[in-house]
């Protein structure tokens, strides 16, 4: 039988949560914990966003410093913010799936440990 991966989610304000994917109760608790942390992470990143009015009043440009490739532009500031958050969410998922480092923000580290040795350390 194939060994299922461990995962760990970190926060400066809490202990690391570790689970084996086959343990449904722990997974449910960790998924809720992870969702809350993911929401907090996204909100913290969005607070760091910088916006500019494009020349000729052609809309708005937004980016989040430290998050390479996360930017948006739209006709209104609200649309620009919404699109920037969508881009950030996709960027996070892509980097997690590729195991690419994600910057820690507001004491939240979204790096996942996929090997049992790292998860138990």
Image (cartoon, rainbow, N blue to C red):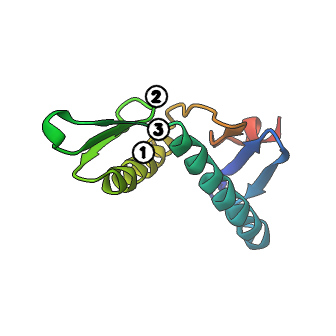
Query: Nearer the observer, disc 2 or disc 1?
Result: 2
How packed is label 2: few (under 14 Cα within 10 Å), some, or many (20 or more)? few
Question: In the structure shown, which secondary structural element does the residue marked by tag 3 occupy?
Answer: loop
Marks 1 & 3, CB-CB < 8 Å contact: no
Q: Which residue is at the front of the view, 40 or 5? A: 40
Q: Earlier in the sequence, mark 3 or mark 2?
A: 3
Q: Which residue is denoted by mark 2 in the rendering?
A: 65
Marks 2 & 1, CB-CB < 8 Å contact: no
Q: Which residue is denoted by mark 3 in the rendering?
A: 49
Residue 43 rendering spot, x and y as whole percentages: 58, 50
Residue 60 rendering spot, x and y as whole percentages: 27, 43
How packed is label 3: few (under 14 Cα within 10 Å), some, or many (20 or more)? some
| Quadrant where the C terminus is found in the figure | top right
Query: Nearer the observer, disc 3 or disc 2?
Result: 3
Give how far apart the Cα atoms at labels 3 and 2 are.
Answer: 7 Å
Residue 54 rendering spot, x and y as whole percentages: 22, 36
Residue 111 as seen in the image, left or right of residue 51: right
Q: Earlier in the sequence, mark 1 or mark 3?
A: 3
Find residue 94 and name its label. 1
Q: Which residue is at the front of the view, 8 or 85? A: 85
Give how far apart the Cα atoms at labels 2 and 1 are.
Answer: 18 Å
Find residue 15 and name its label. none
Q: Residue at x 33, y 50 (%)?
A: 77
Question: In the structure shown, which secondary structural element does the residue marked by tag 1 occupy?
Answer: helix
Q: Residue at x 38, y 48 (%)?
A: 84
Q: Residue at x 42, y 44 (%)?
A: 91
């Amino acid at each position: 039988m194939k060994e299922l991966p461990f995962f760990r989610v970190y926060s400066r304000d809490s202990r690391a949560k570790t689970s084996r994917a086959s343990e449904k109760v722990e997974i449910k608790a960790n998924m809720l914990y992870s969702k809350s942390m993911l929401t907090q992470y996204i909100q913290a990143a969005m607070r760091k966003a910088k916006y500019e009015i494009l020349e000729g009043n052609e809309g708005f440009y937004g980016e989040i410093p430290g998050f390479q490739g996360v930017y948006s532009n739209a006709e209104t500031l609200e649309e620009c913010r919404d699109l920037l958050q969508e881009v950030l969410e996709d960027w996070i998922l892509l980097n997690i799936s590729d195991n690419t480092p994600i910057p820690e923000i507001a004491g939240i580290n979204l790096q996942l440990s996929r090997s049992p040795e790292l998860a138990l350390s």
